[in-house]
Image: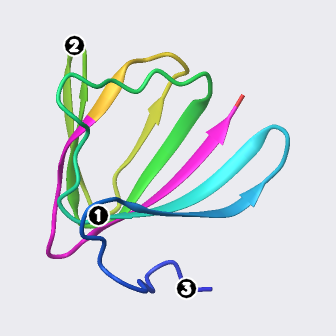
Amino acid sequence: MNLFDIDRIPSSNELTDILAESKKVRIEKIVSAGQVSPKDFWYDQAENEFVALLQGEAVITYEDGNTKLKAGDTVVIAAHKKHRVDYTSFEPPCIWLCVFYD
């Protein structure tokens, strides 16, 4: 598998592939191209999340500000830290590598 291979550019929903998982860890590849979180929606997940943006540009917004990401940038989102995605580039599409863990 090559993380940069994209089967198709998503039109309405992001594409998510679970690459590996166990009881304590899940690794996902997500491809987005212009998708953002719905208005007034906040992720509030029970897991910590390590995020690496492999390709593209994106903006993750928190209740207290936002983080602009470009290819190669990483962030760690603590469990229950409310966040949302307010921008993902279309060309090139975003390729995310996300690791969810306790």
* Tag 1 residue: 71
The three-letter amino acid code for the residue at tag 1 is Ala
x 43%, y 81%: residue: 4
| Eye-nearest disc, 1 or 3 | 3
Q: CA distance from mark 3 to mark 2?
A: 36 Å
Marks 1 and 2, the one that precedes in the sequence: 2
Q: Is residue 5 above or below residue 96?
A: below
* Tag 2 residue: 64
x 55%, y 85%: residue: 2
Residue 2 badge: 3
For label 2, the SS is loop
Q: CA distance from mark 1 to mark 3?
A: 16 Å
| Label 3 with label 2: CB-CB less than 8 Å | no
Front residue of 45 and 55: 45
Q: CA distance from mark 1 to mark 2?
A: 23 Å
Q: Position of residue 57 (x, y in %)?
A: 20, 58
Q: Is residue 56 above or below residue 25?
A: below
Within 10 Å of disc 3 (Cα), the crowding (few <14, some 14-19, many 20+) is few
The magenta span reads 85-101
Marks 1 and 3, the one that precedes in the sequence: 3
Within 10 Å of disc 2 (Cα), the crowding (few <14, some 14-19, many 20+) is few
